[in-house]
Image (cartoon, rainbow, N blue to C red):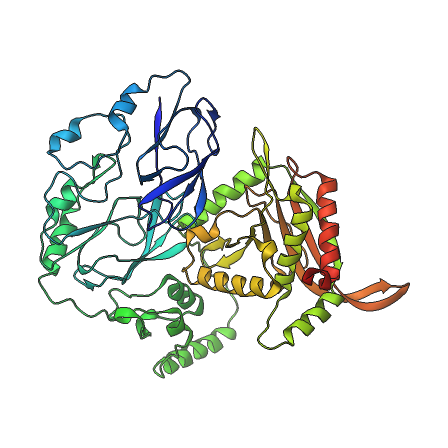
Amino acid sequence: MAVVVTMPRLSDTMTEGTVAAWLKKVGDKIKEGDILAEIETDKATMEFESFNSGVLLHIGIEAGQTAPVDSLLAIIGNEGEDISALLNGGAAPKVETTAPAAEEKSAPVAESKAVTPSAVEVPAGVKVVTMPRLSDTMTTGTVAAWLKKTGDAVKEGDILAEIETDKATMEFESFNSGTLLYIGVNEGESAPVDSILAILGPAGTDVSGVVANFKVGGKAEAPKAEEVKTAVASTTAEAPVAVNTGERIFASPLAKKIAQEKGINLSQVKGSGENGRITKSDVENFTPSSSAAPVQAVAEATAAVAAVKPFVPAGEVFQEEVKNSQMRKVIAKRLSESKFTAPHYYLTIELDMDNAIASRNMINGLPETKVSFNDMVIKASAMALKKHPQVNSQWKDEATIINHHVNIGVAVAVEDGLVVPVLKFTDQMSLTQIGASVKDMAGRAKAKKIQPAEMEGSTFTISNLGMFGIQSFTSIINQPNSAILSVGAIVEKPVVKNGQIVVGNTMTVTLACDHRTVDGATGAQFLQTFKAFMENPVTMLA
């Protein structure tokens, strides 16, 4: 059966998109994961992949044309399939604004995912906030935490909630002002993109009708009657100030994690954030009150008594079930796909880092200049990729894509997993520019401030665990890249130079390659060039 592909919302602020280029033409066979087109958003030009297989039967938006989100982009189906009904009824997506009878129509066209309620009159001033699509591959979102509660006054720009996407946990701000009348997705729950996330409006407004008739993709969401009644009732009273009373503790996910690791009772911590919310720094700076001393003394006394008794095993099996975040699920899915679809092989080489250490010390001796060894690795990789573009490639069933631009992804560990910010046109950047960019993006990634567009379009990836003392390791390729470089720690050890055993500094790096695109000799030549740059850093300044 034919499937309608609509203009995707590739960023949280995108309302329309422009087709920069079609990579497929009508009549071409499409496989799930194939890149259909390049689409310009309000933030970047991004590749848009197909989630369906079949034949490209129709293109609705030609290259160079602009259309609203959810407009008919293409139709994919079986060869020779009749799509006239889809073209007649689905040339333009429509948001229903008529009577409920429209709901009974079984039009096969994928209607626009509504961002306003349908089949009901919306009270004046009421705004429906839907689950945003915060990445190009996001289909569902999970509410990690609500920073506002029903009855709270909300200003434009206030952070409503923290939402887990398939790539990161991000703060979601309100684009409207009003009272939070209804919460549609509770903390820890997941919901499809464009489902009701919240409703804002004048205090005391009855929004039960809006909830009951709101539609996503032509289907009404099931209303949560009790929540709606509670929402309406709560807006008539003065919104209480959020304090830690033991009933509900407002804390960021990172603060909760740190508190758990340190054994800190969050009810004893005073929050410095908005509405008394406990932040990471509140937990890290928390000092237990003196009242805890007697408890500690009793515990120590008990331990002393127990120490003189024969030990009798009295433990119990203890397990903890931690719900997988959306990011963790996607990491597992994509790494599994990469490992089991791309034939990996690994090349390891040892570098003499003496010159690199001396060069870095000289560079960092300049005013307002700071360069890390990781920055040097990134720069050397970018320059080596320009000389060996086959390593900077991408496998497709029909052809191998050779990228002549260099966009290096830098793996960054965050609270819930791993993200890969991308340095665009890395080969054109200086060492200091690379250092500043990596520091900025890594910091924003850990603070959940980085945008999805900044994690798209990598052609090569670097993973560095040297700062953790890891001497060597192998990584799984970050598809659609063809290679990833694993960087170990600098180790001081005896080495042979000019026939003499001397103390030297070495670093081990391992290149994981996709054998479909990068042959062993090609990977080895890339590493030789990379080694030459790293061992003679002055060549990177030319």
Q: In the image, residue 308 lies at what x, y percent?
A: 52, 75
Residue furthest right in the image: 499
Residue furthest front in the image: 64
Give the left or right position of residue 195, taking residue 207 as reference. right
Identify the residue at horizontal 61%, vertical 58% (top origin).
464
Identify the residue at horizontal 12%, vertical 58% (top origin).
202
Q: Is residue 373 visible?
A: yes
Give the left or right position of residue 224, taking residue 111 as reference. left
Say if 86 sits above or below 529 in the image. Answer: above
Placement of the C terminus among the 4 image quadrants: bottom right
Q: In the image, residue 533 lies at what x, y percent?
A: 72, 58
Identify the residue at horizontal 65%, vertical 43% (top origin).
389
**Quarter of the image holding residue 499?**
bottom right
Say if 367 sits above or below 327 in the image. Answer: below
Identify the residue at horizontal 11%, vertical 41% (top origin).
120
Q: Is residue 463 visible?
A: no
Say how many tags the image has. Answer: 0
**Quarter of the image holding residue 280?**
bottom left
Q: In the image, residue 210 lies at what x, y percent?
A: 14, 45
Q: In the image, residue 154 lies at what x, y percent?
A: 21, 62
